[in-house]
Amino acid sequence: MRNKILPCLFVVFALFVVSLMGGREVQAGSKDMVSSKRLKFEDDSVESMRDVFARKEAEEEEYRKKMLSNGDKTIELLTQVRDLLRTLNEKDHGGGIRGR
């Protein structure tokens, strides 16, 4: 008899706990928080989302340009290294391929 009552009590208790959690009013943040499309900083200055997106787009464009510039410089340096290695290899082998 006790074995049948214990699972039933557990189910009733679980439903009671779930009903208590669902009945509360949920608040995100504090009660004095005001939602708007602005970011408020510690010095009480504000920046609109349009300004934030414009600034981020400008930063991303600058980053892309810098990366492309660095890529071109890297290609130039690698080309120079390749040419120097070829020259060094030719000097070591005397300008031709030696027999084995």
Image: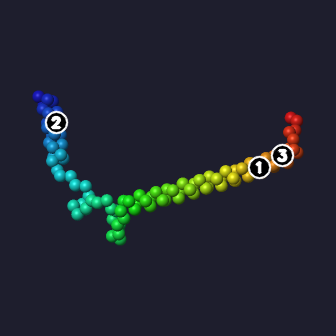
Q: Residue at x 25, y 62 (%)?
A: 34
> Which residue sits at x=18%, y=40%?
14
Label 2 secondary element: helix
Question: Among all residues in the image, which is located at the extreme bottom?
Answer: 43
Whether residue 50 is visible, yes or no, is: yes
Q: Nearer the viewer, residue 31 or 12?
A: 31
Q: Position of residue 65 (x, y in %)?
A: 56, 56
Label 2 crowd bin: few (<14), some (14–19), many (20+), radius 10 Å: few
Q: SS of the residue at dot 1?
A: helix
Q: Which residue is mark 3?
A: 90
Residue 17 can be seen, yes or no: no
Q: Quadrant of the N terminus?
A: top left
- Tell me if 87 is positioned left or right of 37 in this view: right
Q: Which residue is mark 2?
A: 11
Disc 3 element: helix
Percent x, y for residue 82?
Answer: 74, 48
Q: Is residue 8 left or right of residue 79?
A: left
Query: Cβ–Cβ below 8 Å for labels 2 and 3?
Result: no
